[in-house]
Image: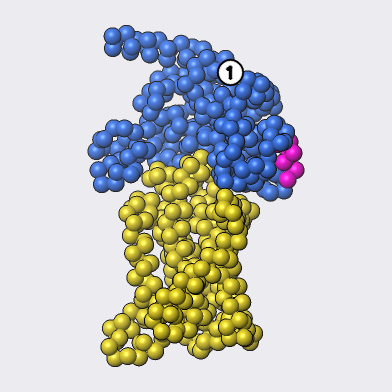
Chain colours: A blue, B yellow
Amino acid sequence: MSRPSIFVEDLYVRFRPYVDRKPTLRRNLGRRRVQEDVVALDHVSFSVDPGEAFGIIGRNGAGKSTLLRCVAGTLRPNSGKVVVNGRASTLLQLGVGFNTELSGHRNVYLGGLAAGMRKREIDERYDDIVRYAELEEAIDRPVKTYSSGMFSRLAFSVAMHLDPDVLLLDEVLAVGDEGFRRKSMQTMRDLLDRSGTIVFVSHSLNNVQEFCDRAIWLENGKIAAEGPSSEVVEAYRDAVDDRQAGQT
Amino acid sequence: MNQTATPTYYSRRLIGYLSELWRRREFVWFLALGNFKARNASTALGLFWWVLNPLLLSLVYWFVFGLLFGTRDIIYLMSGMFVFHFTSQSLTGGANAILQNSKLLSNLRFPRLILPLANLLESLIGFLVSLGVLLVLQVFLRGYVPIASLWLLLPAIALQLIFNLGLGSLAARLAVPFRDINNFIPYLTRIWLYLSPIIWPLEFLDDPAAQSFARFADLNPLFPMIGLYRAALTGGPFQPEMLVQTLIWALVVGIIGVGVFVRYEGKIVRHL
């Protein structure tokens, strides 16, 4: 238990805005039209232990998703170190790798393979995935005919059946209807009980407070506060209150 | 599993990269097959379109070049056209492979070469179908199948695959920072089509008036490649130089394209 699940040290990411010459790149670089580099993460360090739920809060554009992408390993930082111990499953967006023209059945395989499962593993878990998503009836229909709730349930179910040690979530706790939401919360608690680790980016401060043990508050790519989630959320709330008071 | 340091470094060592690719081969296959199926999933004729498309295409060319411009060998025309389409599809698809999958790229870790590979595999399926159509048509029109030379198809397809992968990867890599390439490619393929021995007969190059044109032919990788296919399928003349030239083109373009792509991999997500 001594080894942290996630260890992030001195992480630094900057984006070079191609703004002027290549306007199509603009959307991913924030709304600022600056000439100098945009620093998305400015020497961020933290670690998360097994069995811990860890929250990341902050304003839009503070670097939360960038941080999650570095931990997921899809974005290579300019400098710094990320170590993840165990199998990570990422739910940064729902339904990644899905092709909505194809059936739910086909998409279970596409999503699972995209996330790194072998076909054999998916074969074994297929029935569980479909049952968990409550889509036994609709699984052979094209996914584009699904409601957004059905879509989310299927995507969430595939991600959870990776049996991850580390789960990275970006604003996706509000999956499906109330019944499914409870079930998914329970699944995540089970994961924590098995010494799994959850990192959770959200604007829903109540969820962070309720669900996470610890949290960080990111402001302009820097850690503004770190500690027990209730304290960090309070500090962030106060800052938002102050800012709004200043505006009126 | 213990991932150390910056995880997207797919250890640049070739072996590590290739073994990871091999481990994810099922993903490549499902991605290609998925795109292939999805392409016509909502149409009434569905997968039949993959046979219908090359047939209709041949019909159009037969109409334009056969009927309007006098009799031209339709088998000659189609064999060149299908080979050309395979390469031009890999180029066009490659240029889109990264841009159209930005969601996948920014969310999941995998060797990025999977995307141009899946695109290549998808066009290969269509190409093989069209070769089948060509053979069947040839049986009808000429009443023979070139059993003795069919083996040449193996090196031809293998080498064109390597060539196309290199070309597609190169386009994929360049299209990320320079999106203009996507606008440029249709014109590039158009001129490439006219420079290739598809809609004009080989004798055309012997014409003294076509001398400057003939010089381009020597620089056109599709020239020996199409020659190879014609030797394999339609009883065209086989010269060993075709095989050698195709091999050189495939290796040069394949190695440069894939190499350039893999070296760039780690930066892709930041440039999307």
Residue A173 in the magenta stretch? The answer is no
B56 up-or-down from A246: above or below? below
Q: Residue at x 52, y 37 (%)?
A: A72
Question: In the drawing, does residue A148 fall left or right of residue B251?
Answer: right
Residue A180 in picture, x, y percent from top left: 65, 24
Q: Quadrant of the C terminus of chain A?
A: top left
Residue B199 in picture, x, y percent from top left: 41, 78
At label 1, counting other C-alpha atoms closer than 10 Å, the crowd grade (few under 14, some 14-19, many 20 or more) is: many
Amino acid bearing label 1? Phe
Residue A211 in picture, x, y percent from top left: 58, 18
Q: What is the span of residues highlighted in magenta in the rendered image?
A: A123-130
Residue position for label 1: A211
Q: Is residue B235 visible?
A: yes
The chief SS type of the magenta part is helix
Q: Quadrant of the N terminus of chain A?
A: top right
User: Image quadrant of residue A90?
Assistant: top right
Chain for numbered disc 1:
A
Q: Residue at x 38, y 51 (%)?
A: B176
Question: In the drawing, does residue A92 fall left or right of residue A156?
Answer: left
B152 up-or-down from A165: above or below? below
User: Image quadrant of residue B22?
Assistant: bottom right
Q: Residue at x 63, y 20 (%)?
A: A178
- Seen from the viewer's position, the closer of residues A22 and A79 is A22
Element under label 1? helix
B129 up-or-down from B262: above or below? below
Q: Is residue A83 visible?
A: no
Q: How many marks?
A: 1
- Seen from the viewer's position, the closer of residues A22 and B195 is B195
Q: Residue at x 69, y 27 (%)?
A: A194
